[in-house]
Each structure stands twice: as structure tokens, then as C-alpha cells.
């Protein structure tokens, strides 16, 4: 269970309580500011501290060792000054104070180089004289990757693009503010297949995954994630008491079986009842480098009449897969609870590979729980997901940028 959606109506009588709970971000205090570096497992920048179960909306993961200026604290987060007009939050556990840092302001960008490898990547490198914070996002129609480098002024006088490039169409930048450099990577294909950003020394490296030469199940590797597990039980059924972690594993094993019958390669995040933290799952998946991740969960809501299937994505470039899977499962006598974007779930956050979260049905609904309990339903759902993936692949093969 991840995402029951509720409508909350605030009336005039609730305004004073709402104001009391609001946390004001402290103003910039230069005399208390300090410098440090990002550290720990998957440090992430956030827009704000958040008020719901999923926490503050995540901007994206950032590499370790990135030099940042801390200007305040909000609850368990530090406020970072990314540039003159931009701030973000980061978990206090993800920042380490460094009193001997030699701070460079502004940081200058040097030469760029882009080339294609013998494997499945095009690579872009950008020379900098300090590791700076960055954010990135996908655009569609036409497809592009955009990266903002904070605290950077351009000293880039050439960008070398080699003929070995196969996915990158154009590469350029805009100095959008005095201390913000925007990198634009235009892609040849409409479908985003993923990208990874990190530092090699002080050189920023962007690995852009190419569209496979043959777009078909036989040529792709799928990761299947059974949600929850071990000490994290997830939701429980209202009528039969079904435990989410047990049934997501059954659905995952059935999906693994159906994908293998279609001759796809499959990676499982878990095959038994084990505790596996979501951050560790992301790190595991980044190491295994699948083409596609499907994460399976079972939903729950206070309103026991709510039922049906829903699919989720965070990055707009990964939305098409979630739409095709939803369409196929709803065709199998299931209500559609919706296709939800910008979803703040750990396994939707990586940009490294196409991913989709499927909330198959509601454990809190009697009719859905009866279906979940039925092995024939689990087999049917797995087959519908595979059909949805095939529909998506046919769409990808014919779509042009």
C-alpha cells in the first residue's frame, strides 16, 4: 500500500490550527551559514519539508561530496543556498560540515565532451573547478534532459561532440542566471530510457541510456519489485486480513514467470519474505541496471468502497509505460483508480531506468481482497501487465521525436 488519495476540505474554523502547524523557513543568516559536503546513501534535494505521509516532494538525488552552503534548518532538514535565488532542503544526516573547504565562487565551467560507448550509453562530461549542486528533469515533445548547475558561470568555449553518439541529438547550454547554468541534452528518440548523473573527480558525467536497437521483450531486462517485506508488512485486508508483503511477492513471482515465458530477462528485488529498505533497493537496481522496473503494491483506503487499479510515475518521460499497463489491467474487469504522476515514491525517483509502480487493487475493499486472494486473478494481472508492456514497446518503436 502506498497511495490512498483523499479529499481534504478546510473550513474557516480550521485556519488557526493550520497556521500553528506551518513551519516558516528561517531567513538567510550569513553569520551562521556554513559549508559542507553531501554524504550518505542517496542524498536527495527536496522542495520543502512536506506535510503528508510521503514527506516533502523530492527534487532528485545528488552525488556525494557535492559542496553546499547551509543557511538554516527546518525540522530535520538543512536549508541549502544553491544559488542567489534558489534554495532547497536536505536531510541533516546527508550533510557533513567541512571547516577546511577552499570555496570557489563563482565556479567556472570548462570544456565539454560527448561521445558514444561500445555499450548502451552516450556520455557527456563537463569540466568544473568544484563539485556543485545540480537538479535535472525530463522534457517531452521533443524529448530532452535538462540539468541546472548552481553557482556556476560559463567559461565553456567549446563543446566536442563525436560521431559515435547514437542517442544525443544536440548539446548546448543557457546561462539562465548569473550563477545558474542550464545544460540541454536533446535526444533522437521520443521515449526516455534513462540517465545517470554523477561526478568523476570534479568533472560532471551524464550517462544517457540509448534506445535499444531492437525494441522487444527478448532484448530487454526487467526488474520486478515485490513491495514491502520482512518487518515492513504494508497494508492488511479488512475482511480476510491478507498481508500486503505476502501477496505482492506472489504477484511478483507470477509476473516473473510471465515475462520469462515471453523470453525477457528478469531481476527480482526479493524472492522471499525479507526486509529490504527502499534506498537499498534503489542502489541494488542502479547496480543491476535493468531497462525497466515494475514495482508491485496493494492499495488501502479508509473508505472501504474505494477499489480498482492505479499506476504511478514521477518523471514525465516514463509516463507512457504506466498508461499502457493501466489500460490493459482495466480491460480485465477492473476499475481504474487513475494514472498518477509526480509521485514521491523512492522506486519512482531514479532517472536511471524506465519505471512504473502498479497498485494492483485495494486490500481495504472486500471485492478487491477476494480477487487478490485468487491465484487465477494473480496470473491474469501478470499477463495483462506483460500485454501492457508489449503495447508500450510497439508504441515506442513507431513514435518519432
Image (cartoon, rainbow, N blue to C red):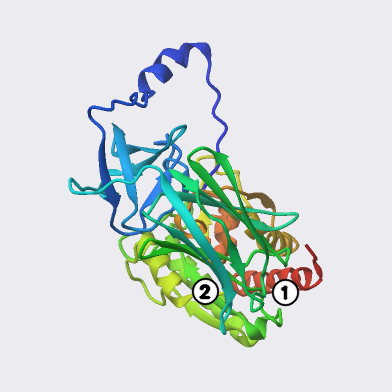
Closest to the observer, 358 or 265: 265
Q: Quadrant of the C terminus?
A: bottom right
Vertical placement of residue 230 versus 265, above or below = above
Q: Residue at x 59, y 63 (%)?
A: 159
Could you tell me how far apart the alpha carbons at marks 1 and 2 are, in whole angstroms?
Answer: 16 Å
Q: Residue furthest left?
A: 99
Q: Look at mark 1 in the image and give the residue it sits on.
A: 390
Closest to the observer, 373 or 314: 314
Q: Can you see residue 293?
A: no
User: Residue 392 at what x, y percent from top left?
Assistant: 72, 68
Vertical placement of residue 226 versus 63, above or below = below
User: Residue 317 at what x, y percent from top left?
Assistant: 65, 58
Displayed quadrant of residue 168 = bottom right
Q: Is residue 187 left or right of residue 273?
A: right
Closest to the observer, 182 or 386: 182
Q: Earlier in the sequence, mark 1 or mark 2?
A: 2
Displayed quadrant of residue 384 = bottom right
User: Residue 333 at what x, y percent from top left?
Assistant: 73, 60
Q: Can you see residue 370?
A: yes
Q: Look at mark 2 in the image and give the residue it sits on.
A: 223
- SS at mark 1 in the image: helix
User: Residue 85 at what x, y percent from top left?
Assistant: 47, 32
Which mark is on residue 335? Answer: none
Q: Residue at x 66, y 86 (%)?
A: 218
Q: Residues within 10 Å of mark 2 (few under 14, many from 20)?
A: many
Amino acid at each position: 500500500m502506498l497511495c490512498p488519495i483523499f479529499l481534504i476540505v478546510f473550513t474557516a474554523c480550521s485556519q488557526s490550527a493550520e497556521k500553528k502547524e506551518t513551519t516558516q523557513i528561517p531567513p538567510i543568516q550569513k553569520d551562521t551559514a556554513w559549508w559542507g559536503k553531501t554524504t550518505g546513501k542517496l542524498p536527495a534535494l527536496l522542495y520543502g519539508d512536506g506535510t503528508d505521509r510521503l514527506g516533502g516532494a523530492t527534487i532528485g538525488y545528488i552525488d556525494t561530496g557535492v559542496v553546499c552552503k547551509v543557511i538554516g534548518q527546518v525540522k530535520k532538514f538543512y536549508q541549502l543556498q544553491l544559488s542567489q535565488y534558489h534554495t532547497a532542503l536536505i536531510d541533516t544526516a546527508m550533510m557533513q560540515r567541512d571547516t577546511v573547504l577552499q570555496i570557489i565562487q563563482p565556479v567556472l565551467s570548462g570544456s565539454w565532451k560527448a561521445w558514444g560507448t561500445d555499450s548502451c550509453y552516450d556520455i557527456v562530461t563537463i569540466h568544473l573547478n568544484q563539485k556543485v549542486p545540480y537538479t535535472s528533469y525530463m522534457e517531452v515533445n521533443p524529448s530532452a534532459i535538462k540539468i541546472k548547475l548552481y553557482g556556476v558561470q560559463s567559461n565553456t568555449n567549446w563543446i566536442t561532440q563525436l560521431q559515435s553518439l547514437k542517442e544525443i541529438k544536440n548539446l548546448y547550454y543557457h546561462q539562465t542566471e548569473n550563477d545558474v547554468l542550464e545544460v540541454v541534452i536533446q535526444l533522437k528518440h521520443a521515449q526516455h530510457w534513462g540517465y545517470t548523473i554523477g561526478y568523476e573527480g570534479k568533472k560532471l558525467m551524464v550517462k544517457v541510456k540509448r534506445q535499444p536497437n531492437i525494441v522487444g521483450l527478448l532484448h530487454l531486462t526487467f526488474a520486478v519489485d515485490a513491495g514491502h517485506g520482512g518487518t515492513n508488512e504494508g497494508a492488511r485486508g479488512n475482511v480476510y486480513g491478507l498481508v500486503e508483503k505476502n501477496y505482492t511477492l506472489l504477484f511478483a513471482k507470477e509476473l516473473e514467470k510471465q515475462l520469462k515465458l515471453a523470453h525477457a530477462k528478469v531481476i527480482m528485488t526479493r524472492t522471499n519474505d525479507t526486509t529490504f529498505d527502499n534506498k537499498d533497493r534503489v542502489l541494488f537496481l542502479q547496480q543491476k541496471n535493468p531497462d525497466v522496473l515494475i514495482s508491485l503494491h496493494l492499495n488501502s483506503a479508509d473508505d472501504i468502497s474505494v477499489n480498482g487499479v492505479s499506476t504511478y510515475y514521477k518523471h514525465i518521460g516514463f509516463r507512457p509505460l504506466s498508461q499502457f499497463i493501466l489500460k490493459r489491467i482495466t480491460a480485465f474487469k477492473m476499475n481504474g483508480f487513475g494514472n498518477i504522476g509526480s509521485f514521491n515514491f523512492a522506486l519512482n525517483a531514479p532517472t536511471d531506468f524506465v519505471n512504473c509502480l502498479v497498485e494492483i487493487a485495494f486490500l481495504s475493499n472486500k471485492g478487491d481482497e477476494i480477487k487478490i486472494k485468487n491465484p487465477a486473478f494473480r496470473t491474469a494481472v501478470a499477463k495483462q501487465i506483460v500485454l501492457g508492456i508489449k503495447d508500450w514497446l510497439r508504441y515506442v518503436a513507431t513514435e518519432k521525436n
